[in-house]
Image (tube, helix red, strand yellow):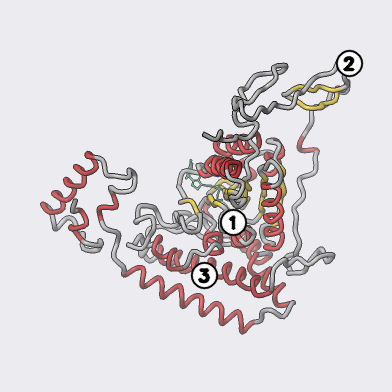
């Protein structure tokens, strides 16, 4: 059998200097580069710290004295290009218009679904107001093969990758067309077709999953060099970066050179806890450097900057032996956290209004498009009206549709249903048949027959 090549660092036994490390794969001997401390050297040089100069000046480095990491932007809040030395577009006008339409669709969908929850027509919703540029801009730089791990405020990624309003509605109303079979809370989208892993509620679980998936992608390509290079992309909020999973994921991605791009949406809040109370350091970007990861902070309201950062990050992630990259995108959360939250209980309405007035990824791109003659008031009116109409059509169709058959409650965990699951399904059927007035199963596809074995 042909031996499966593994990355040089994958099979190394962990020892400390001065042991020389040898791969356990005898067919491809590979050694860790030796790190040695020379006699009378002027610096510390061993596997715990590389080239750290000795100093006789006692200095405790104080991060507060260092300038904050800068924020990359191409376009200012008025839609003016701040760096005119190059074309920021990197895409045809028509394509830029689709990004704009996608951002607009997310924001109109948000308003309609937020109100639908208030009317009691859905149980829950989360908007991504103010963060549409991060989602659409980064996703516009990805390939269909790339794997996406989302948190929950990235509807723009789903849309940009080809999910439709109909797909959203099926999930939000948990109807029979929902690929998750109605098992998840609203907004927990997933799509195998679009390589979007299903969103899970426990924060940060997607981050180590993304590192692991990236490692698998890399191994796959080592086994078969004809496999198209692809990365995993992981989105999360700055609040999720307080979880242990975040740290484990970044460290393993860095040490194992995984082709993963981490996209942190820093929107200033983890529900009611402002970022300023969540951490003391310079945002999440400073943590990337701490883990030895190439990092950039970008203006999340500038779709061009976000996209360019992702194009470059993707290239870096795949170059040579691969590596992770961290993008921290800054964009204030102008909405409530979710339909379960009233953010004016912990922040001033005036502050939110000021952010809304001052900047927004949608109006910023619109201003740029108007200056270029690509967009005008008539086009805006037409786009808004047609998007709204389409959303409302899909809304009422999805709302009326049957719910998934009851048997899906028991399926898909195991390839074949286990005997105890079959017994539970039988018991559920007996209960519903015994108390038909208590359980109305008519909204479900196949009604009670959906529990036939
Ligand atoms: C492990 C875990 N702890 C707490 C929660 C409750 N929770 C849901 S969202 C959230 C805030 C997350 O903030 P952030 O990551 O910044 O994302 P944002 O909502 O700002 O987009 C919290 C604490 C959870 N879902 N999972
Ligand atoms: Mg946040």
Circle 3 sits on which residue?
A: 108
- In which image quadrant can residue 256 be found? top right
- Name the residue tied to disc 1: 333
Confirm or reject: label 2 Cβ below 8 Å from ligand 1: no
Q: Nearer the viewer, mark 2 or mark 3?
A: 2
Q: Give the side of residue 275 with respect to residue 201, left or right.
A: right
CA distance for labels 2 and 3: 67 Å
Quarter of the image where one finds residue 87: bottom right
Mark number for residue 446?
Answer: none
Give the alpha-carbon distance from disc 1 to disc 3, as whole Å: 16 Å
Give the foreground label among 1 and 2.
Answer: 2
Residue 56, horizontal then vertical, whole percent: 88, 20
The residue at 13%/57% (across/down) is 436
Structural crowding at the residue carrying mark 1, measured as other residues with C-alpha within 10 Å and reported as few (<14), some (14–19) or many (≥20) = many
Residue 235 position within the rendered picture, expressed as x and y whole percent measured from the top left:
57, 50
Question: Residue sitting at 27 percent across and 44 percent down?
Answer: 417
Inspect this view and state whether residue 131 appears. Answer: no
Tell me the distance, in whole angstroms, between the alpha carbons under discs 1 and 2.
54 Å
Q: Looking at mark 1, is its residue's CB closer than 8 Å to ligand 1?
A: yes
Whether residue 165 is situated above or below residue 174 in the rendered picture = below
Q: Is residue 239 left or right of residue 93?
A: left
Closer-to-camera residue (196/114): 196
The residue pinned by badge 2 equals 40
- Disc 2 element: loop
Dot 3: element: helix
Element type where label 1 sits in the image: loop
Expressed as whole percent of the image width and height from the top left, the position of residue 136 reads: 60, 62
Q: Nearer the viewer, residue 77 or 182?
A: 182
Which tag is nearer the camera, tag 1 or tag 3? 3
């Amino acid at each position: 059998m042909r031996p499966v090549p593994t990355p040089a660092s994958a099979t190394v036994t962990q020892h400390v200097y001065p042991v020389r490390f040898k791969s356990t794969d005898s067919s491809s001997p590979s050694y860790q580069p030796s790190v040695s401390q020379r006699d009378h050297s002027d610096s510390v040089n061993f596997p715990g710290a590389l080239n750290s100069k000795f100093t006789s000046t006692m200095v405790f480095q104080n991060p507060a004295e260092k300038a904050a990491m800068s924020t990359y932007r191409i376009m200012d809040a008025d839609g003016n290009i701040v760096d005119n030395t190059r074309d920021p577009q990197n895409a045809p006008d028509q394509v830029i218009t689709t990004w704009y339409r996608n951002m607009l669709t997310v924001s109109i969908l948000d308003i309609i679904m937020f109100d639908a929850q208030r009317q009691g027509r859905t149980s829950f919703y989360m908007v991504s107001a103010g963060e549409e540029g991060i989602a659409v801009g980064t996703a516009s730089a990805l390939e269909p093969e790339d794997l996406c791990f989302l948190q929950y405020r990235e509807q723009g990624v789903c849309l940009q990758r080809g999910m439709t309003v109909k797909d959203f509605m099926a999930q939000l109303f948990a109807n029979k067309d929902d690929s998750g079979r109605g098992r998840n809370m609203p907004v927990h989208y997933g799509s195998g077709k679009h390589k979007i892993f299903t969103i899970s509620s426990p924060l940060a679980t997607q981050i180590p999953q993304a590192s692991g998936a990236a490692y698998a992608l890399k191994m796959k390509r080592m086994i078969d060099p004809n496999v198209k290079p692809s990365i995993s992309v992981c989105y999360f909020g700055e609040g999720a970066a307080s979880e242990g999973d975040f740290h484990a994921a970044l460290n393993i991605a860095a040490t194992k050179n995984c082709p993963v791009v981490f996209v942190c949406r820093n929107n200033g809040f983890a529900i009611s806890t402002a970022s300023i109370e969540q951490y003391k350091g310079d945002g999440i970007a400073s943590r990337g450097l701490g883990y030895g990861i190439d990092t950039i902070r970008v203006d999340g309201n500038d779709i061009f900057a976000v996209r360019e950062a992702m194009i470059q990050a993707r290239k870096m992630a795949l170059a040579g032996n691969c590596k992770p990259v961290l993008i921290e995108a800054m964009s204030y959360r102008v909405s409530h956290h979710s339909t379960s939250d009233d953010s004016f209980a912990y922040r001033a309405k005036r502050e939110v209004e000021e952010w809304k007035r001052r900047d927004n990824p949608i109006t910023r791109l619109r201003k740029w498009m108007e200056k270029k003659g690509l967009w005008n008031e008539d086009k805006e009116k037409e786009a808004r009206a047609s998007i709204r109409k389409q959303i409302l059509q899909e809304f009422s169709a999805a709302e009326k549709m049957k719910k998934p058959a009851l048997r899906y409650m028991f399926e898909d965990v195991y390839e074949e249903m286990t005997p105890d699951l079959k017994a539970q399904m039988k018991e559920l059927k007996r209960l519903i048949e015994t108390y038909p007035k208590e359980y109305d199963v008519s909204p479900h596809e196949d009604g009670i027959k959906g529990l036939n074995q």
